[in-house]
C-alpha cells in the first residue's frame, strides 16, 4: 500500500526501481497477532468519531521566537511585533505554519500514545498524509487540537491509524492547521 503511494509520486521516481516485498501478486490472508486483532476490533468502533479533545495552549511571542531560533526562520511577520503591528494584515506577529504542526504531539497528547494504547508494545509516528494551514495563528492566541479517527489498516503485527487533526484557534471559526497524522501501533 505505502509503496504504491510513494511509487506514484513524481518526487520519488527512483523508488519504482526498487523491488517491493509487499507487491507480490499472491494474496495471502492477513492473520493478525491476537493482541492486534483485539485492538483492531475495538478501534473499528471508533472510526469516524472524535477520539481526543486537547487542552488550550497559548502560542505566545516567546514560543514563536524560540521556533524561529531553532529553524532559522526569522521572517519579520513572525519575529518583529512592532513591524507586524504596522505592516501585517493581521496587525500582529503570527506563528510559523510549521510551528503549529510541530505543536501537534503536545496538543494531541500523542506523546503518551503508549499509555492510550497499553496493549501495544510501541507507538510510532509514521508520518503525515496531508497538511494545510488554512488561517494564521496570531501571537497570543490559544489553540487546541481535536482528533478524529479516519483510517485504520491492519497488518500482521501492527495497526496503522490515520487521524484527522484540527487545530482550533479560540474565538475563531477558522482552523490554524488541519493534518492527517499516521500512527503505527506495534504488538
Image (cartoon, grey):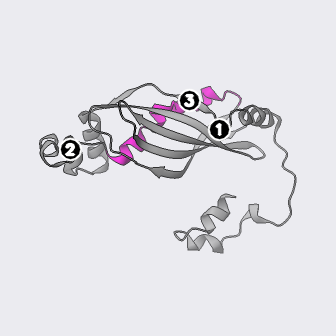
User: Is label 1 or label 3 in front?
Assistant: 1
Where is residue 20? Give x, y as percent: 71, 65
Alpha-carbon neighbours of circle 1 within 10 Å: few (<14), some, or many (≥20)?
some
Q: Secondary structure at mark 1?
A: loop
Residue at 19% x, 48% y is 88
Q: Quadrant of residue 141?
A: top left
Q: Nearer the viewer, residue 138 or 103?
A: 138
Where is residue 81? Give x, y as percent: 16, 40
Q: Quadrant of the N terminus?
A: bottom right
Alpha-carbon neighbours of circle 3 within 10 Å: few (<14), some, or many (≥20)?
some
Residue at 23% x, 50% y is 74
The residue that mark 3 highlights is 52
Disc ID at residue 112: none
Rounded to the nearest angstrom, the CA distance separating label 3 from label 2 is: 32 Å
User: Is label 1 or label 2 in front?
Assistant: 1
The residue that mark 2 highlights is 79
112 in magenta: yes
Residue at 33% x, 44% y is 136
97 in magenta: yes
**Image side of residue 171 versus residue 130, left or right:** left
* Magenta-colored span: 96-119
Pointers 1 and 2 in contact (C-beta within 8 Å): no
Q: Nearer the viewer, residue 151 or 174?
A: 174
Where is residue 105? Give x, y as percent: 48, 36
Q: Quadrant of residue 80?
A: top left
The residue that mark 1 highlights is 48
Pointers 1 and 3 in contact (C-beta within 8 Å): no
Q: Please tell me whether the stretch drawn in magenta is mainly helix, strand or loop.
A: helix
**Image side of residue 119 versus residue 176, left or right:** right
Amino acid at each position: 500500500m505505502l509503496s504504491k503511494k510513494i511509487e506514484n509520486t513524481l518526487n520519488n521516481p527512483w523508488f519504482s526501481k526498487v523491488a517491493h516485498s509487499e507487491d507480490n501478486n499472491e494474496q495471502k490472508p492477513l492473520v493478525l497477532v491476537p493482541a492486534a486483532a483485539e485492538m483492531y476490533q475495538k478501534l473499528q468502533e471508533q472510526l469516524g468519531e472524535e477520539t481526543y479533545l486537547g487542552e488550550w495552549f497559548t502560542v505566545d511571542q516567546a514560543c514563536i521566537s524560540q521556533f524561529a531560533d531553532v529553524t532559522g526562520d526569522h521572517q519579520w511577520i513572525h519575529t518583529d511585533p512592532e513591524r507586524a503591528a504596522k505592516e501585517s494584515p493581521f496587525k500582529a506577529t503570527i506563528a510559523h505554519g510549521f510551528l503549529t504542526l510541530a505543536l501537534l504531539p503536545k496538543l494531541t497528547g500523542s506523546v503518551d500514545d503508549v499509555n492510550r494504547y497499553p496493549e501495544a508494545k510501541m507507538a510510532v509516528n509514521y508520518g503525515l498524509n496531508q497538511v494545510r494551514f488554512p488561517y494564521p495563528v496570531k501571537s497570543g492566541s490559544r489553540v487546541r487540537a481535536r482528533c478524529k479517527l479516519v483510517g485504520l489498516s491492519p497488518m500482521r503485527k501492527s495497526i496503522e491509524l490515520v487521524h484527522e487533526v484540527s487545530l482550533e484557534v479560540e474565538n475563531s471559526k477558522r482552523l490554524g492547521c488541519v493534518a492527517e497524522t499516521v500512527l503505527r501501533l506495534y504488538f
